[in-house]
Image (cartoon, helix red, strand yellow):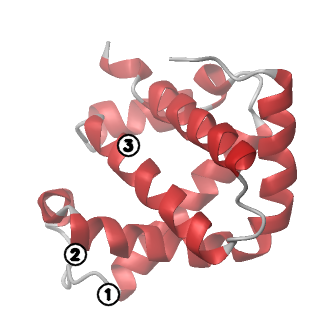
Amino acid sequence: MTSLTQKDKAAVRAFWSKIAPKSEDIGAEALCRMLTVYPQTKTYFDHWEDKTPNSPQAKKHGITVMGGVAEAVSKIDDMKGGLLSLSELHAFTLRVDPANFKILSHCILVVMAVMYPNEFTPQVHVAMDKFLAAVALALAEKYR
């Protein structure tokens, strides 16, 4: 994996400052998209009463996910350390297959591109892709 350069980090921070007010909408849409496009991911949500993509539980979890992304942005210089508790939660308690982090990252990228077509330049795309890959790697840390 390519590490984040200072230029990438600056692009991530700048783009995040633009999208942060809509991050809950991004998360809800990305989670709904993931459940639709990758229905096998529903197995992690058996405890939900309603597993349909637009359910209140799906939207709520999307909001929670974007809270984690916001945390990652704030800890961009040490994501492994900064996301350690989330890594432990997903590895030991929730037992989520880390491949799903990449799936959700892709869905987040798609939603950001759709919601912010003018701001989601090729440079922002590269930076956000690398950032979300780094987030997925940090979340998978405790699986090793």
Q: Which mark is residue 101?
A: 3
| Residue at 66 percent of width and 29 percent of height | 82
| Label 2 Cα crowd, 10 Å radius (few <14 / some 14-19 / many 20+) | few
Left or right of 118 in this view: 3: left
For marks 3 and 2 on the same chain, the one whose residue lies earlier in the sequence: 2
Q: Give the alpha-carbon distance from disc 1 to disc 3, as whole Å.
A: 21 Å
Q: Is the Cβ of the residue at disc 2 closer than 8 Å to that at disc 1? A: yes
From the top left corner, tell me how far across and down residue 81 is, in percent. 63, 21
3 or 2: mark nearer the eye: 3
Of the 4 image quadrants, the one containing the C terminus is top left
Q: Amino acid at mark 3?
A: Phe
Q: Which residue matches tag 2? A: 48
Q: Are marks 1 and 3 in contact (CB under 8 Å)?
A: no
Q: CA distance from mark 3 to mark 2?
A: 20 Å
Q: Left of 131 or right of it: where is 17? A: right
Residue 111's place in the image compared with 69, above or below, is below
In this view of the protein, which residue sits in the foreground, 126 or 53?
126
Q: Residues within 10 Å of mark 3 (few under 14, many from 20)?
A: some
Residue drawn at point x = 73 percent, y = 55 percent: 121
Where residue 98 sits, quadrant-wise, is top left
Q: Residue at x 59, y 21 (%)?
A: 80
Residue type of the residue flagged with mark 1: Ser
Could you tell me how far apart the alpha carbons at marks 2 and 1 are, in whole angstroms? 9 Å
Q: What residue type is disc 2 on?
A: Trp
Q: Which numbered disc covers residue 55?
A: 1
Which residue is at a point 35% across and 72% down the rendered structure image? 33
Point out the tag, 1 or 3, that comes first from the N-terminus: 1
Q: Is residue 8 left or right of residue 3?
A: right
